[in-house]
Image: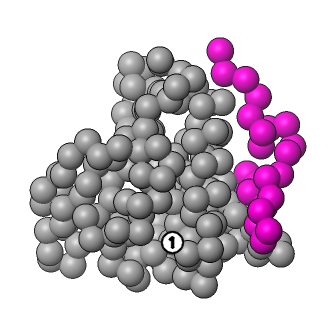
Amino acid sequence: MPGKSQIETGIKLKTANCTIEPMGVDDWEAVREIYQEGIATGNATVDAEPPAWEHWNSTHRPDCRLVAKDGGKVVGWAALSPVSARAPYSGVAEVSVYVAEHSRGTGVGRLLLETLVTESESAGVWTLQAMIFVENQASITLHSACGFRSVGTRERIGCLHGQWRDTLLMERRSKVNGA
């Protein structure tokens, strides 16, 4: 049975510049702006624009949503989406990690992803997956550093601005749940 997570017990994780906290509705505008910055790179998602809060909220797990804050300002976020509504897949989730343009390369993404892994295990998740554009080497490197492995390439899986894109499917199996 999953235990209480560090976030639930009120512990704020801190690096030299960031704390990791649960994402709240008040963080949405900053999260949305960071999502838009990711969209602008052309290598983060096939979405052309961030969704409205209501849609985003309904498609992401309520228990594994994090923000990285530097001086009280949101500089990154991470969240999980269920991969299926079917009960046998309840412990499988897709990872999203986005870092503000000015904070990329500073360790914020790694801190978010490592914390998300811990939170997901506290929530009973046994498999995390990430679909990463094959061109997004920074994200592939980050996920590899956090224990994800390549499962394979999905060819022409999504279309962005009229161009079909390939993604690398990566996964991380929990050593705590479903072992």
Pick the front one: 149 or 89: 149
Q: Residue at x 85, y 37 (%)?
A: 9
- Give the left or right position of residue 155, taking residue 179 as reference: left
Q: Residue furthest top?
A: 1
Residue in view at x 79 percent, y 53 percent:
13
Q: Residue at x 55, y 75 (%)?
A: 105
Tag 1 secondary structure: helix
- Residue range corresponding to the magenta coloring: 1-24
Q: Is residue 74 magenta?
A: no
**Viewer-nearest residue: 178 or 79:** 178
x, y percentage for residue 64?
A: 62, 43
Residue 85, given in percent of the width and then of the height, sits at 40, 30
Question: Which residue is tagged 1?
Answer: 35
Question: Residue 52, image x and y in percent?
Answer: 52, 66
In front of the other: 4 or 31: 4
The residue located at (37%, 33%) in the rendering is 84
Q: Is residue 111 above or below residue 92?
A: below
Q: Is residue 157 above or below residue 161?
A: above
Above or below: residue 167 compared with residue 98? above
Q: Is residue 22 magenta?
A: yes
Q: Is residue 171 left or right of residue 162?
A: right
Which image quarter holds the N terminus? top right
Residue 101 in view (yes/no) = yes
